[in-house]
Amino acid sequence: MPLKDKYDYIVTGGGCAGLSFILHLLQAPSLANKTILLIEKEQNRTNDRTWCYWEKNAGFFEEIVFRKWHKAWFHGLGYDALKNLGPYAYKMIRGIDFYNHCYERMAQSGRVDMVHEAVKGIENINGGVEVSAGNEIFRGDFAFNSILFDKPILADTTYYLLQHFKGWIIETKEAVFDPAQPTLMDFRVAQDHGTTFVYVMPFSANKALVEFTLFSPSLLEQEAYDEGLRDYLKDYLKITDYTLLEEEFGVIPMTDHVFSPTSGNIVHLGTAGGQTKPSSGYTFRFIQKHVAAVVDQLAVSGNPFLEKSVLQKRFMWYDRVLLHMLFHKKMPGSRIFTLLFSRNPIQRIFRFLDNETKLRQELILLNTLPQWPFMKAGWKELFK
Ligand SMILES: Cc1cc2nc3c(=O)[nH]c(=O)nc-3n(C[C@H](O)[C@H](O)[C@H](O)COP(=O)(O)OP(=O)(O)OC[C@H]3O[C@@H](n4cnc5c(N)ncnc54)[C@H](O)[C@@H]3O)c2cc1C
């Protein structure tokens, strides 16, 4: 298909945020005449990640949800509980299903031109944008960018922890998993390298994703993740005979750095647009809420710019306080999460982590944590 001289919207980066944004765009009747170009460097998508998140009702991507669970285990320090998640479900989407679904929808619409090149830069020029990719320059009214070109330049006071994890999809001969009972967090493992936990997402009685996860300033040697996984399988799940089917490795920044949401006519989406929750690394649902709001704004006003709410500032402060506690090692993450999960209904924790609680619920939740260290951290972060 020949490319146009100019597009209404150029989407740079076609991962979770870029593709979610386009799918929302395609469903907005008042934007049906808008021209869309997607520039994504990867030609062939693989099952490079799985997304897990909680949600109350059927969501925008419900038809590609691979598994969902209504109960989940939490194992903390001297505390073990199987939690009923209702009205939430914990859901999993496989990367490959997501990419295929989005590509199919885009092809069906016939409205999205696609270029597979690496974007080199995006500039605001003459009231629009110019994107250089490969040897070409593409022009548009707005760019929607989810490419994190460089690690952000951090102020001295900014926290930057990494959530890093290695996951194995394993298959066993024996039926060892209960497919209805995943483990959300298991903190019983050694905490030598920082906050460390494992989660287990069973697909069937003999197949599961087991993920070894840390919050810490730096990565480990690959062998250390493998050892963590092997030990967990042996010591806690009593599994020694298994086949490793697939492996995933990921790093998610946990930072209070403020990613600028826009610059001129460039709107940043996804992790590059600050949609990763600093204190948890969860991003998928924040991306969905954000792209839906941007598309609504485009449909209503023709521009994609959203106001930053007071609410967002309050939750950013909570995130900073937790990062402060972890970064300065004021209290082990395993203890903080054990207190949270043993003293609060999981629904309150989910709402809080979704930035959807009311002030009263937040005060109740904060009251379940040791007050003095958190108050000190909160005070410092308020005046930082
Ligand atoms: C392995 C893994 C597992 C995760 N699991 C979860 C989870 O369970 N739950 C959750 O909430 N979050 C999870 N996350 C965090 C987050 O949801 C994902 O990172 C998510 O993919 C972020 O979406 P994004 O669009 O910002 O970035 P991406 O999905 O990474 O998309 C960016 C896109 O830009 C493309 N690109 C990069 N550079 C260029 C360039 N120069 N030119 C053109 N294209 C380019 C990339 O190929 C990619 O397609 C996970 C992250 C990883 C890495």
Image (spheres, helix red, strand yellow):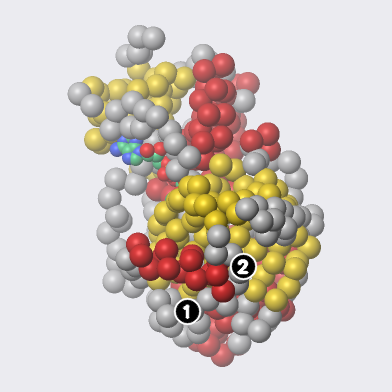
Q: Is residue 227 above or below residue 284?
A: below
Whether residue 144 appears in this view of the structure is no
Tell which residue pokes out farthest to the bottom in this image.
372
Using the image as rendered, state which of residue 185 and residue 237 is in the foreground: 237
The type of residue carrying mark 1 is Gln
Give the structural element (helix, strand or loop) at label 1.
Answer: loop
Count the numbered circles shown.
2
Q: Is residue 20 above or below residue 384?
A: above
- The residue drawn where x is 47% and y is 20% is 112
- The residue drawn where x is 43% and y is 76% is 194
Q: Is residue 371 left or right of residue 267?
A: right
- Residue placed under numbered mark 1 in the picture: 191
Tell which residue pokes out farthest to the left in this image.
135
Mark 1: is the Cβ under 8 angstroms from ligand 1? no
- The residue drawn where x is 30% and y is 56% is 152
Which x, y percent locates residue 339?
64, 80
Q: Is residue 233 above or below residue 378?
A: above
Which x, y percent locates residue 153?
27, 59
Q: Is residue 262 left or right of residue 174?
A: left
Using the image as rendered, state which of residue 323 and residue 103 is in the foreground: 103
Quadrant assignment, res 367: bottom right
Which x, y percent locates residue 218?
33, 68
Marks 1,2: beta carbons within 8 A: no
Q: Which quadrant of the figure contains the C terminus?
A: bottom left
The type of residue carrying mark 2 is Leu
Q: CA distance from mark 1 to mark 2?
A: 18 Å
Q: Is residue 101 above or below residue 55?
A: above
- The residue drawn where x is 46% and y is 69% is 228
Mark 2 burial class by Cα count in 10 Å: few <14, some 14-19, many 20+: few
Give the structural element (helix, strand or loop) at label 2.
Answer: loop
- Residue placed under numbered mark 2 in the picture: 237
Q: Is residue 346 left or right of residue 11?
A: right
